[in-house]
Image: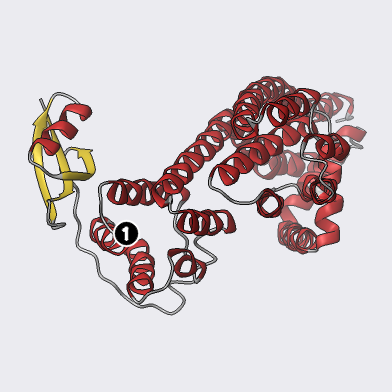
Amino acid sequence: MTTYFYQATNQRGKLIEGDVEAEDYPTAIRRVRSFNYLPIKVTEGKPHRSLSFDLKLPGAGFKKKISQKELMTCTQQLATLIDSGFTLDKGLTVLVQVTEKPFTREILSEVQKRVHEGSSFGDALAEHPNIFSKLYINMIRAGEAGGMLPSVLNRLAEFMENSEEMKANIRSAMIYPAILTLVGGSAVALLITVVIPKFSTLFDDMGQALPLPTKIMLGISSALTNYWWAILIALTAFVIGFSLYLKNEHGRLRWDSLVLKLPLFGALTTKIEVSRFSRTMSTLLGSGIPILQALMIVQAILTNRAIAAAMDPLHRGLKEGEGLSKPVQQTGIFPPMAMHMITVGEESGNLEEMLVKVANTYDKEVERSIKQLVSLIEPVMILLMALIIGFIVISMLLAIFSINEIAF
């Protein structure tokens, strides 16, 4: 038997906390419900509570954000409360009580206060644009207008869960290449900055003309050892300049266009954006948002601005009554299979369902492409590190062998 800690509300809406013994998580949920409680949060083991001091330091709250995972959890909990008959005001009050992180609790408290004063939920969320995205706010507004807020909250939670799963797959796939880069880069840096300078002193004492590879290696080592600060300044200036370039709309568009032309990375970027487009459009349309408004929201959240700009024909086509399938073909972005599935969905009247299938299909394509990319990156990185270290070793050996030519 395992101990589960629960937070729940009774029939009067009072927050209840306690522990139950159960064999597994579903059994724990049933045990809590058998007490005539509505479970809000059930976790294995007892909660780890620590004393916290709410110090108001200068700049402490600068650009704070709620993580996507935490926002997803709050959305699911609020959907459960409203589905169970709680009013939005009461549901937000309970949500504030069960939220552990101070900043999240502060934001939810402000939203609850605005709703209690008579503001709509969507307008209350819109006062925090750095926390809640345009997608989130517009879906909430559509849910309020159509009287289907619980359904929209569930859709939002599912959408965020799928997005987080995709990001987690990408992060996990890149762990090994990142470790390989770190270890290999550290080994090369150690050789160049620690080992080679010692050989340099030895060769200087010999006074012998050195082979060209050795001179190149010693020059690189000397530059990194003596002028590391200048290199660091140059790299910092480059990073800042490149960041400013990407913040410029024209610069970002040119860079994103270049990314799409890169081997492997271009196709992967396209698949990711097609999946994001399809899932977001499906979620918005299913929440009752008009297709033109949904398209504007989707266009704003696409990461690649070149693909976002390619969506302009969709606006014109929809305004002219051409539907979605024909303008999609004019963008030149969507792969043939995606265009075919969207066309079939529109002609059969199941566009929303078909967009979900497109998103699921390309999520799997993205996962497969990432695995292929990682499987290609690994040997390339190993070969590159071997060539660099090999060049270092050979340049040193050539110099050592040349010592035999010195006349004593």
Q: In this orientation, which residue lies closer to the viewer: 176 or 45? A: 45
Q: How is the image coloured?
A: secondary structure
118 sits left or right of 146 in the view: left
- Residue at 59 percent across and 27 percent down: it is 360
Position of 365 compared to 309: left or right?
left
**Residue positioned 79% across, 43% down in the render:** 205
Q: Badge 1 is on which residue?
A: 101
Q: Residue at x 79, y 28 (%)?
A: 335
Image point 89% across, 25% down: which residue?
405
Above or below, 110 against 183 in this view is below
Q: Is residue 4 visible in this depiction of the protein?
A: yes
Q: Position of residue 220 (x, y in %)?
A: 81, 45
Residue 204 in view: no
Q: Is residue 146 left or right of residue 150?
A: right
The image position of residue 352, as x and y in percent, is 61, 35
* Quadrant of the drawing holding the N terminus: top left
7 and 35: which is toward the camera:
35
